[in-house]
Image (spheres, rainbow, N blue to C red):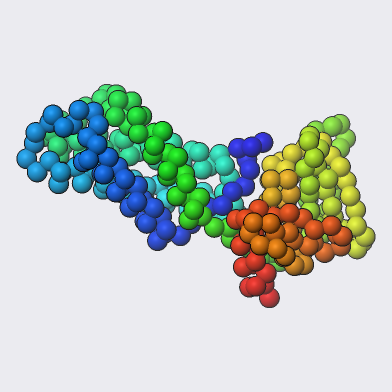
Amino acid sequence: MLFKRSIAYTSNWFHTLLLTSILAVLVVFILIFLQPFNTYAIEIPHKNIKVLGYGICIIIPLLFIHVFEQSWFKLNHQKWYLYQEIIVLFSGLLLISSVSYFYNTIVINHLEIEPKNILKWSIIFGLPFAPIFIPFWAYLRFAFSKIVIQPVSVENKIEIVINGNNQNEEVKFSERNFLMANAQSNYVDIYYLKNDVLQKEMIRSTLANIIKEIPSAEQVHRSYIVNPSQIEKISGNTRKGAIAIRHLKEEIPISPKYFLGVKEYLQNRP
C-alpha cells in the first residue's frame, strides 16, 4: 500500500528546530503584512509584538510532537512510513491551532477559556492555513530528512516466515540469507539463499507486507527492498544510482534519499 511506503525521516533536533522556526517566521509574516481575517481592523496595544507570539505557538507544539515522533521512529526499528508522516502533519496542525486558541484567548483578548470553542477556532482560523502550512511543512521535513541504515548482524539466524495471499503460499528463510524483494503488480519476487544457493520465490503480496516481516530490510526504491548486509557496492549518483547485491547479477535502482543513506552505511560498515 502507498501509505505504508518507507520514507526518509527528519530525526535531527537541530534540523527540527530550524524548520519549525522557518514555519513560525512564515506565519508571523502572513499575520503582520497580509493581515488575514480582517485583523487590520483590530486595534490593540503592541499589536505586532503580540502577533510574534503566534510564532511561539508553532515552535513549541512541533518540538513537543517531535518527542513522540522519535519514540515512534525507534519502535519501528528506525523506519518511517508515509502514513506516520501524514498523521504527524495533521495532528501537528491541530495542536498548533489549539495552542494558538489559548494564546489568543488569554494573552490577546484576556478572556476565559471555553473548551467548546477550541474546535470552532481550529475550523475558522486553523483550517484556512492548512493548504499553505501543511505542504510547506512537508517540503521542509523532506528537505531536512535523512535515511539512516542500521548495521545488521551477520550472526542473525532468525527464521522468517512469509505467507502470501494465495492458499498454502509460504516462504521460509533465515533473515541473514534474505537478499532482495521486487514488487511486480500484485506479486513480489523474493530472493534468498538456501545452503548458499540462490532461490527465487514469487508470492501474491505487497512490499509493505514483506518488509513488516523482515525487521532488517530496507526499502531503497518504491519497487525494491534489500538486506543491507548483502549490499556489495553502490554506483552512479543521487540522480541515477544503483546498488549491487551479492549473488545477484542485475543491479537494483535506488532512490535519491536512499543513495546517500546507503553510501554512508557502506563507508561506515566494518
Q: Residue furthest bottom?
A: 270
Question: In the image, residue 127 lies at what x, y percent?
Answer: 36, 29
Would you say 197 lies left or right of 132 here? right
Q: Nearer the viewer, residue 22 or 219?
A: 22
Would you say 9 lies left or right of 101 here? right
Residue drawn 42% across the image and 43% down it: 136
From this view, report whether residue 14 is shown above or below residue 51. Answer: below
Q: Nearer the viewer, residue 124 or 234?
A: 234
How many badges with numbers are in the image?
0
Q: Nearer the viewer, residue 108 or 256?
A: 256
Question: In the image, residue 200 lies at what x, y percent?
Answer: 89, 50
Question: In the image, residue 260 lies at what x, y percent?
Answer: 61, 62
Q: Quadrant of residue 197?
A: bottom right
Task: Give the quarter of the figure containing the C terminus.
Answer: bottom right
From this view, report whether residue 5 is shown above or below residue 268. Answer: above
Q: Mark yes or no: residue 164 visible.
A: no
Residue drawn 60% across the image and 55% down it: 257
Q: Nearer the viewer, residue 267 or 166?
A: 267
Residue drawn 51% across the image and 43% down it: 85
From this view, report whether residue 227 is shown above or below residue 172. Answer: below
Question: In the image, residue 38 lies at what x, y percent?
Answer: 20, 28
Q: Residue furthest left?
A: 45
Residue drawn 84% across the image and 32% down it: 166
Q: Mark yes or no: residue 55 visible.
A: yes
Task: Give the quarter of the figure containing the N terminus.
Answer: top right
